[in-house]
Image: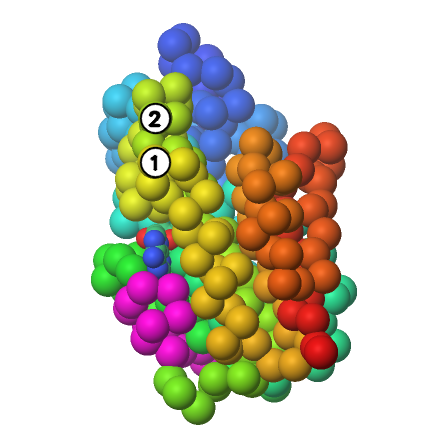
Amino acid sequence: MRSRDVVSGVGDLPEHEAIRLLVAATGRTRSEVLVGFDVSSEEQDTFGSYVERRRRDEPLQYIEGTVPFGSVELRVDNRVLIPRPETEYLFEQVTTLVDDPAVIVDLCTGSGNLALALAAAHPNCEVYAVDLSPDAAAVARGNAEANKLDIHVLVGDLFDPLPESVKGRVDLAVSNPPYLAAGELADLPPDVLAEPEMALVAGPRGDEVVARIAREAQGWLAPGGLVACEISEFHGDRVAELFERYDAEIRQDLVGRDRYVVARLRTR
Ligand SMILES: C[S@@+](CC[C@H](N)C(=O)[O-])C[C@H]1O[C@@H](n2cnc3c(N)ncnc32)[C@H](O)[C@@H]1O
């Protein structure tokens, strides 16, 4: 069967999703799928199983298995949040804000996306990646190995598992923490609900984890060190208050929503 016919045979999924699933099932490129090739019966079976998974609202990226982020390629599955373009934009911003950092910490690392992209961008830097979920940490470790990047992946609560030796030496603490309020879960589409709840929900208000980062980072940052976090579009004003001891700036995403805090610890 020709690839175009395989794609058009799936009436109930958007065409672009069927194309991506066929790319994943065959290892061919998108262009090859569009130009046309003969899909073997084995490939058709694999494609059929992917289509079934997608029909059950499994995110496309879990089925495809990998996501590009910065210069790294990350394996993802249901143990971790799927890295988002908004978070890649945070990475792009912070690389321009730190000059030859000695120590970087990625809190709430998930797949390791921020830690690994930053490690690739700053090869001489000591990079620590922390996650409370041992499952997420296992994914991040696998991704470090697959990308041949030497980072320290630690399991624990925010700064807790970091070695004492980095206290006062952290040039950049970066994070995409959970920032949804528990009540917001009900409004999410089913494929987002397939992602781990602890990656999404911070607590009853939603700003609990970023509030702790603002407080606790002060004990770990180097003089003039930087905190950069992704935040909820609804928390800009609140988060600015949480960082009152820093020179803090709420930054917007490409469509103008408050989505990041970039805060430099004041040196007295
Ligand atoms: C929004 S996800 C972000 C994952 C990844 N950094 C990304 O950008 O795709 C948040 C992650 O924080 C972890 N997490 C939640 N609470 C935490 C805590 N108190 N300390 C460390 N990690 C935590 C979750 O397990 C999850 O992997």
Q: Which residue: 54% across, 71% down? A: 218
Disc 2 to disc 1, how far (Cα)? Answer: 7 Å
Q: Which numbered disc, 2 or 1, marks the residue closer to the eye?
A: 1
203 in magenta: no
* Residues shaded magenta: 150-162
Q: Residue furthest top?
A: 11
Say few, some or many: other residues with alpha carbon within 10 Å of mark 1 (under 14 / 14 to 19 / 20 or more). Answer: few
Say few, some or many: other residues with alpha carbon within 10 Å of mark 2 (under 14 / 14 to 19 / 20 or more). Answer: few
Q: Is mark 1 within 8 Å of ligand 1?
A: no
How many callouts does the rendering have?
Answer: 2
Image quadrant where one finds the N terminus: top left
Residue at the disc numbered 2: 183
Q: Are marks 2 and 1 in contact (CB under 8 Å)?
A: yes
Specify the label residue 204 is tagged with.
Answer: 1
The earlier-in-sequence mark between 2 and 1 is 2
Task: Name the kind of residue labelled 2 in the image.
Answer: Gly
Task: Name the kind of residue labelled 1 in the image.
Answer: Pro
Q: Which residue: 34% across, 36% down? A: 204
- Left of 157 or right of it: where is 231? right
Q: Is residue 149 above or below residue 85?
A: below
When asked about the image quadrant of residue 97, the answer is bottom right
123 or 211: nearer the eye?
211
Magenta stretch, overall SS: loop
Query: What colour scheme has been applied to the protein in the rendered image?
Result: rainbow
Q: Is residue 3 above or below residue 131?
A: above
